Image: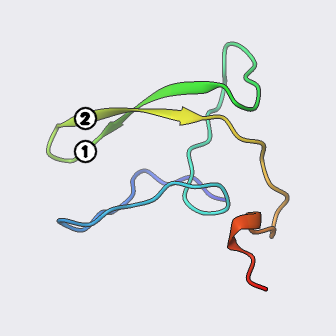
Amino acid sequence: MRPVQGVDIPAGGEAKLAAGGLHVMLIDLKAPMKEGDVVPITLTFDDGSSKQVDAKVVRPMAAGMAPMSDHKH
């Protein structure tokens, strides 16, 4: 993992934030959170617009593990 200052999204494109890929990590929290909590997060775009989304708190995955839904049998 490494912090990034932004995520490039091409015009008309999208970026998916998900555990095991691009994700948001909250640091220096004032209170503990638990799995299943919902946290409002404001995304700010280069054009000055913003959008608030509700993000569900999920348990961190061990390094190198893919989400179960991504496994192919």
Image quadrant holding the N terminus, namely bottom right
Q: Residue furthest front?
A: 73
Contact (Cβ within 8 Å) of mark 2 with mark 1 = yes
Image quadrant holding the C terminus, namely bottom right
Give the SS element for disc 1: loop
Q: Residue furthest left?
A: 47
Give the SS element for disc 2: strand
Q: Position of residue 5 (x, y in %)?
A: 43, 50
Q: Amino acid at mark 1?
A: Phe
Residue in front for this viewpoint, 54 or 3: 54
Q: Earlier in the sequence, mark 2 or mark 1?
A: 1
Q: Position of residue 71 (x, y in %)?
A: 75, 76
Name the residue that disc number 1 marks: 45
Q: Residue furthest top?
A: 31
Residue at the image point whose x is 66% and y is 25% from the top: 37
Q: Position of residue 57 (x, y in %)?
A: 66, 35
Residue at the image point whose x is 75% and y is 69% from the top: 66
Q: Residue furthest right?
A: 62
Residue at the image point whose x is 58% and y is 55% from the top: 18
Q: Position of residue 23 (x, y in %)?
A: 57, 51
Q: Is residue 12 left or right of residue 64?
A: left
Q: Is residue 56 left or right of residue 62?
A: left
Residue at the image point whose x is 39% and y is 58% from the top: 7
| Disc 2 from disc 1: Cα separation | 6 Å
Q: Residues within 10 Å of mark 1 (few under 14, many from 20)?
A: few
Q: Is residue 71 above or below residue 28?
A: below
Q: Is residue 48 above or below residue 65?
A: above
Residue in front for this viewpoint, 46 or 65: 65
Residue in front for this viewpoint, 40 or 26: 40
Q: Is residue 40 above or below residue 48?
A: above
Name the residue that disc number 2 marks: 50
